[in-house]
Image (cartoon, grey):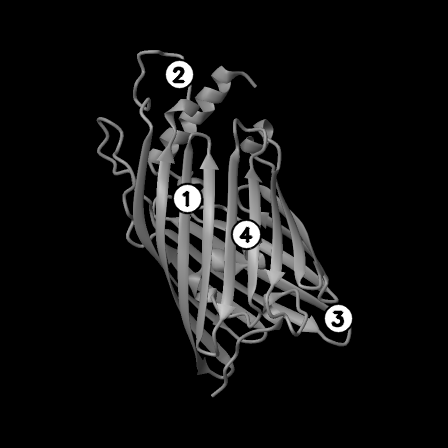
Amino acid sequence: MTNSYKSHINYLLICLFISSTWICLGQQLPLHNQYVYNPTIINPAFAGVSAVSHINLTTRSQWVGFSEGIKTTSLSGNHAFNENHGIGGVLFQDNTGAISITGLELDYSFKFPVFLDYNMSLGLGLFPYQYFYDASEVEFNDPNDNTLDLSDKATSFDVNFGLFLYNDLVFAGVSVLNMIQSSNIESLEGSEDPNQLVRHYYGIIGYNYFNDASDMGIEQSVLLRSTSSSGLQFDFNLKANFNESFFLLSGYRTNQELLAGFGVKYGKFAFMYNIDINLGSIGEVSNSSHELGLIFYLNNKTNVLDWGNDLNLQYD
């Protein structure tokens, strides 16, 4: 790929990002598939829902072959202090060509029984982050074009909120990320549009059933994504769990992506892999997206692979 072509792609990504158009869904916040086994990354209320404390290291390469692609690395954790209180967090860096965001989300959740055997978790996440634009990564064909020729760095702060309703079979959650819609750097010269994070909305619903006699289980879930400047996007996922040591995942995303993955657990460690295959226009100029995850279980006494099989439940 020539430098000229790469510069055009980088320039396009930057302009789309700063204008807060529909692509902001994939650019302003890291896009993960592995929320299926780690919902903390999309909902602060999940902190402490699982009785198993764990640490997750995840790396994702999105749109491989498309200019520099999008590369995301994150370190997240989940811990239940007791039946009522949980904490979690996500440290991440998201690189999109000349743009990078480094953020740290600190989560707290409070859980209580609501009706029948259902529990509710309310979560709040504090989200300081740093935005960096590196002008040296962009080459322009027109030497007089100085629209984006100065690097810029800014630190800001935002807030995330979520709720999560669950029992030992079904679950549902909603969350709003970037509630404040904080600004990061100045808008483009001559533009009246503010350069800021926009609100991201997530909704998830599903069920998890595991049969102890056969040591097999199944989980189905639907994830909804949206922002204040984009339409709805859905993920449909189906996961099969075998003997709490191996799972297979398949799914479909409504931007014309096929999803697949697997996970393997051994002792206190688990390894996850996901792939997205885009069947649309992006897939014509890029390869698949790949995501790798490594989990370390801190107190996995019941030896479970799925978070839904060891919940922090209270009963009236």
What x and y, as percent, mark residue 106?
40, 59
The numbered disc on residue 102 is: 1
Q: Is residue 212 above or below residue 219?
A: below
Mark 4 lies on a secondary structure that is strand
The numbered disc on residue 215 is: 3
Along the horizontal axis of the image, is 194 left or right of 273? left
Q: CA distance from mark 1 to mark 2?
A: 26 Å
Q: Which residue is mark 2?
A: 140
Q: Residue at x 54, y 70 (%)?
A: 50
Query: For mark 1, does the 10 Å Cα neighbourhood hold few (<14), some (14 to 19), or many (20 or more) residues?
Result: some
The numbered disc on residue 235 is: 4
Q: CA distance from mark 3 to mark 1?
A: 41 Å
Q: Residue at x 30, y 18 (%)?
A: 146
Tell me which label, 2 or 4, sits earlier in the chain.
2
**Closest to the observer, 118 or 310:** 310
**Closest to the observer, 127 or 142:** 127
Mark 2 lies on a secondary structure that is loop
Along the horizontal axis of the image, is 180 left or right of 266? left
Q: Residue at x 44, y 26 (%)?
A: 10
Mark 1 lies on a secondary structure that is strand
Mark 2 and mark 4 in contact? Answer it, CB < 8 Å: no
Which picture quadrant has residue 109?
Answer: bottom left
What x and y, as percent, mark residue 187?
26, 33
Tell me which label, 4 or 1, sits earlier in the chain.
1
Q: Is residue 233 above or below residue 15?
A: below
